[in-house]
Structures are given as structure tokens and as C-alpha cells.
Image (spheres, rainbow, N blue to C red):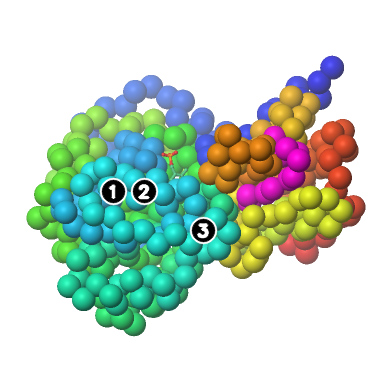
């Protein structure tokens, strides 16, 4: 007998849970992609995509996952041989740096390890040493989905401005947009990348690059963007075909229309952030309590620097791996694997997991996940502190 039958719940940090309304909006006949409702609907998505990022600049939509979005940003920002400075705070910063290197960019990295955010001062120091202004852009992950760290983008911008270096600031918000507070204009961001399948609650397949007027001007005439990736026609559309350099991702766009309406017009972006803040604090309260009586700890010690969409956790003695398996087979909940925290050959490889709390989720879903984690720890004999569910419930009750 298994208690997993019933509606399953994928609590991994992307793809996230999708609203039935988004799925239903996609369930329709193929539309005409040359004129009519589809074309009008797409034009309306542009201002709403800018609203969700609090960006008054531009946005280009690509048929791609987040890795494609990374390459879109790189292909347009750099010319061959340009230099990028990449802040590493986990697996995803490493991945973006590697893509840039493979595409012909000179990549310099500053590694901040797996437990702490990027230090704005260290980034400014590296820029100050670059007297010849070879560094074209600084690449930072807002929330690194592997470590769960949340970098302080506004502070990084402020330090960059202090040293008076002209580098662009490019941010990966794939794990944070539509979950964690993000303000493109106010924080002085030049380029930002996100994808459809996390906070935006749409199936994987779309990625987006937002850009400032400064980025448009600074990157004009680059030699890396091939016709598909070039953002120039995509942000200045005369013909519908230019939006996507070919056939539109028709059904994804209907799903996106529905999700943006839910986020912006029904709930409101600030309320979306507030909901994620409270739900993440409920998860953290439970983990704190469990950790008092067992070898259980959140990866990022400072709650002010944790992402509100995903929490990376260590449970010693291989407990994380056993717990994930139990939850999936006995409770219908799938948690995220640990990513980049230990090599598969490392004896501690099974000590890491991630709890996603991004997108279409509410109090009962979070309390359900926490309750089943507690049941799993009891079933598996994993030592843990008491009072976790009361602590989480108190956070939810506070609102
Ligand atoms: C998920 C994620 C990516 C990669 O996105 P894919 O759609 O899997 O290619 C990149 N960066 C961050 C921060 C992510 O969370």
C-alpha cells in the first residue's frame, strides 16, 4: 500500500506547479500566426512582461529554456574577445560563465563559494583594477537555485557606480522572477534573463531577455548574435514574424497571457512577493526546529540572503536522499535533488535536497509538504527536533 495516490505535487525548483487556468488557456485549436487575435494578444504581452520585471526598457521573447536565455543575453551583449566578469555563488553562475566562455568571451570569475552571497565590494574591486575597461558586463545570478542564495543586486549596482566603471549589469532571474522582489529600473539592471517555467507558472519553452536603453546602445554592432538570437528585430517589431524569428510559440503564449493576468491584475506583483516571503518563512521555521534535534541545516545561514523560491537543505548520513525517495513513493511529493553541493563520488552526495516554494502555491501546499517531510523522517528514523509543524503554522497564521 502506498499513500502516494491522489494528486501528485512536484516541489522541485522548476518546472513549478502550473495553474489549471494556464493549462486550460493552452487547450485550443492552432491559431493563425499572421493576423488576428494571436498577433494582438502578443503585442499586449510586451507591456505586461515589462510590468512583471518593473522594467521600462525592452523585452525579447525566445523559444528556449533558461540555458537558451543565457546564450541570447551573451550573444547580444558581447563581441568575440570581450571580457565578462561573472560572480559565482553556485551551479547556475558556473553554467552561465561556461556558456560565455564557449561562445568566445574572455571570462573572469570571482568565486564566492556555496554558502555566501556575492560581495559587492569584491566585484567593485575587480572593476576598479580594470583600468582599460575591458570588462563589458558583470553577470550575477539573483537567486542561485543550487545553493538557494539571494544576491543583493541593488548593492552590487551601487558599488559598480562608486568605482565609475561602465560595465553593464546582467542578472539571471530565472529562479526568482515572479517570486522574489525584483526591480529592473530601480536597481539599475541593464540585462535580465528569465524563463517561463518557474515563477511565471507556464510550461518550459519560453525565455525572455529584458534590456535597458543603455544596453541597446552599448551592444549595437556586436559580432556574436546570429539571426535567431539577435535581439534587435525582436524588440522593434514591424512584422509579427520578427517577434520569434519564425513561427510563434502559440500555445505557450496563451498560457503566459493567463499567468500574467493572474500575477499582475488579480493578485498584484507585490502580493505575489509577499506570499512567497511568508511561505518561505514557514519552510524555514520548520527547518530551524528540525535542525535543533538532528543533523539538518539550511545551506544559507542568513535568512536575509536566502531566496524565497527555493531552500537548499543538508540532512546528514544520506538522510536527504532517503527522504526524497520516501516522499515520492509514499506521499506523492517530489522534492528537488541537491545540485552541485557534492560530487556523485563524494560519500556525502546523498545529504542534499531542495524544497521549492515557487509559483502557484499556497499555505496548504506548503504545510502539506512540511507535514509529509516530518512523516518521512519519523518513518525513516531520521533524528529531528520537535515543534516544526507548529512553528510553520504560526508563520502562516501570522500571515
Ligand atoms: C532553472 C535555472 C536555470 C536554467 O534554466 P533551464 O530552463 O533549465 O535551462 C538557470 N539559472 C537559474 C537561476 C535557474 O534557476
Residue 60: percent from left, percent from top: 27, 48
From the viewer's side, name the closer residue of 82 and 394.
82
Instruction: Name the residue rendered at 64%, 55% in the picture.
Output: 299
On residue 100, the disc is 1
Rendered position, 395 above or below 324: below
Tag 3 secondary structure: loop
Rendered position, 105 above or below 129: above
Q: Is residue 272 visible?
A: no
Is the residue at mark 2 in contact range of ligand 1, meaning its CB lies under 8 Å from it?
yes
On residue 133, the disc is none
Magenta residues? 311-321
Give the residue number, with chain letter if any, for mark 3.
113
Is residue 320 rendered magenta in the image? Answer: yes
Give the residue number, with chain letter if any, for mark 2.
96
Instruction: Name the residue rendered at 13%, 58% in the picture.
Output: 220
From the viewer's side, name the closer residue of 285 and 110.
110
Amino acid at each position: 500500500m502506498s499513500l502516494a495516490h491522489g494528486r501528485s505535487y512536484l516541489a522541485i525548483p522548476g518546472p513549478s506547479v502550473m495553474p489549471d487556468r494556464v493549462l486550460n488557456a493552452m487547450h485550443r485549436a492552432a491559431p493563425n500566426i499572421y493576423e488576428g487575435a494571436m498577433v494582438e494578444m502578443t503585442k499586449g504581452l510586451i507591456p505586461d512582461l515589462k510590468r512583471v520585471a518593473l522594467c521600462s526598457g525592452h523585452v525579447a521573447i525566445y523559444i528556449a529554456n533558461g540555458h537558451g536565455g543565457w546564450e541570447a543575453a551573451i550573444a547580444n551583449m558581447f563581441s568575440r574577445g570581450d571580457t565578462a566578469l561573472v560572480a559565482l555563488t553556485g551551479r547556475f553562475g558556473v553554467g552561465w560563465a561556461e556558456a560565455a566562455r564557449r561562445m568566445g568571451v574572455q571570462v573572469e570569475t570571482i568565486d564566492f563559494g556555496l554558502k555566501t552571497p556575492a560581495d559587492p565590494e569584491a566585484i567593485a574591486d575587480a572593476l576598479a583594477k580594470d583600468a582599460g575597461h575591458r570588462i563589458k558586463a558583470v553577470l550575477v545570478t539573483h537567486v542561485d537555485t543550487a545553493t538557494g542564495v539571494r544576491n543583493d543586486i541593488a548593492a552590487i549596482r551601487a558599488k559598480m557606480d562608486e568605482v565609475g566603471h561602465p560595465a553593464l549589469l546582467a542578472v539571471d532571474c530565472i529562479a526568482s522572477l515572479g517570486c522574489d522582489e525584483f526591480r529592473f529600473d530601480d536597481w539599475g539592471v541593464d540585462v535580465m534573463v528569465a524563463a517561463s517555467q518557474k515563477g511565471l507558472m507556464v510550461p518550459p519553452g519560453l525565455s525572455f531577455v529584458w534590456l535597458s536603453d543603455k544596453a541597446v546602445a552599448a551592444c549595437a554592432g556586436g559580432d556574436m548574435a546570429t539571426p535567431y538570437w539577435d535581439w534587435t528585430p525582436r524588440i522593434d517589431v514591424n512584422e509579427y514574424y520578427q517577434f520569434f524569428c519564425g513561427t510563434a510559440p502559440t500555445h505557450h503564449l496563451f498560457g503566459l497571457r493567463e499567468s500574467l493576468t493572474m500575477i499582475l491584475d488579480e493578485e498584484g506583483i507585490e502580493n505575489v512577493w509577499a506570499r512567497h516571503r511568508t511561505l518561505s518563512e514557514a519552510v524555514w521555521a520548520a527547518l530551524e526546529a528540525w535542525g535543533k534535534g538532528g543533523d539538518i541545516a539550511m545551506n544559507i545561514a542568513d535568512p536575509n540572503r536566502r531566496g524565497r523560491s527555493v531552500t537548499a537543505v543538508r540532512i546528514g548520513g544520506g538522510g536527504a536522499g532517503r527522504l526524497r525517495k520516501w516522499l515520492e513513493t509514499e506521499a506523492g511529493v517530489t522534492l528537488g535533488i541537491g545540485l552541485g553541493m557534492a560530487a556523485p563520488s563524494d560519500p556525502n552526495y546523498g545529504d542534499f535536497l531542495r524544497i521549492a516554494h515557487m509559483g502557484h502555491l499556497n499555505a496548504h501546499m506548503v504545510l502539506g509538504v512540511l507535514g509529509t517531510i516530518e512523516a518521512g523522517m519519523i518513518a525513516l528514523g531520521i533524528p529531528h527536533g520537535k515543534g516544526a509543524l507548529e512553528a510553520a503554522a504560526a508563520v502562516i497564521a501570522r500571515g
